[in-house]
Image (cartoon, rainbow, N blue to C red):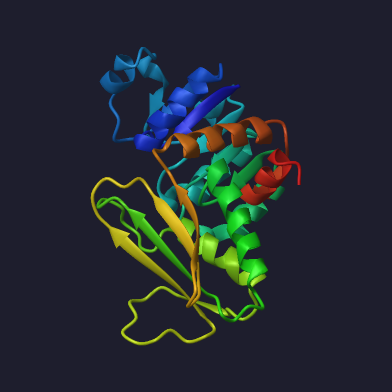
Amino acid sequence: MRVAIVGYGRMGHEIEAVLRARGHEIAAIVDPAVSGDEIAATGMDPAIRADEVSRELLSGCDVAIEFSLADAVAAHVDEYARAGVACVLGTTGWLDRLPEVRRTVEASSAALVYGSNFSIGAHVFFRVAAGAGSLVKDLEEYDLLIHEMHHRGKQDSPSGTALTLAEAVLAEVPRKKRIETARLDRAPEPDELHVSSSRGGAIPGTHTLYLDSAADTIEVRHQARNRGGFAIGAVRAAEWIAGRTGIFTVDQFIDDLLGR
């Protein structure tokens, strides 16, 4: 595949490495904060870098992989649609514009797969955790709670992954009806699923579901070692979306990957 990387921060660099390892060609890099010298230092032609996504830039590309800014998503998707290029969209914070984006993609010959987390391991974790929750859904001796930890530089709290995990648990445990993410200076209500967060150090990301009773504690945990898992998932998603049309969620990609 010939791939455009949109957003060349830490995730963009990881995606570049995975693309190269899997034999794909990097056709364009879009990031106004990146210089031609930085691109040249990687051995690539600095002419492939650009400040903006455009149909001209996308000419000859099979897929774009985007981890950039939420404000740019709708305009970028319009360009992908006009160029007939598929996109893996890992940017978060734009879902208020999903109806608009859906209309754009469905009116074109392009394709889009989107999600807040493309880590294959994290999605296996969601399914394992949801299954664990379903086992105790009628055992009121067990309360359920979620805690996540990330490095001190992470901007959002709780993480999107923690909220996705919480939604997966709620779907399997009817007695938990709502997610509470605030600091609690009181006892949680029986129908609340409390999601708490810690920030510090260089922790790449740890999410834990606790099933806790007076007698014991069961922990279901996913611990990311680095961003490599997210990059591998995004590139696998690019391989999956290439040649398709329409709009898909990351869950549809994962279900297909896992043969579900």
38 relative to 80, above or below: above
Residue 93 seen in this snapshot: no
Of 101 and 257, which appears nearest the observer?
Answer: 257
158 vs 7: above or below: below
Q: How many marks?
A: 0
In the displayed structure, does residue 232 sit left or right of residue 135?
Answer: left
* Residue beneath the point at 45% across and 59% down: 208
x then y, percent, for residue 164: 53, 60
Which quadrant of the structure image shows residue 120? top right
Residue under the image location 55 percent in, 32 percent down? 235
Find residue 149 and report its horizontal and vertical position in percent: 35, 56
Relative image position of residue 78 (x, y in whole percent): 57, 45
Indicate left or right for 123 with 188 as reference. right
* Quarter of the view holding residue 142: bottom right
Q: Is residue 35 left or right of residue 100?
A: left
- The image position of residue 33, as x and y in percent, is 29, 35
Q: Residue at x 49, y 27 (%)?
A: 57
In this view, the residue in front, 189 or 33, is 189
Most extreme residue toward the front is: 215
Quarter the N terminus occupies: top right
Dividing the picture into quarters, in which one does residue 102 lie?
Answer: bottom right
| Side of 135 relative to 118 (left or right) | right
Residue found 41% across the figure and 44% down from its top: 68
Residue extending furthest toward the right: 260
Judge whether 59 appears above or below 103 on screen: above
Residue 206 seen: yes
In the depicted structure, whether residue 19 falls above or below residue 68 = above
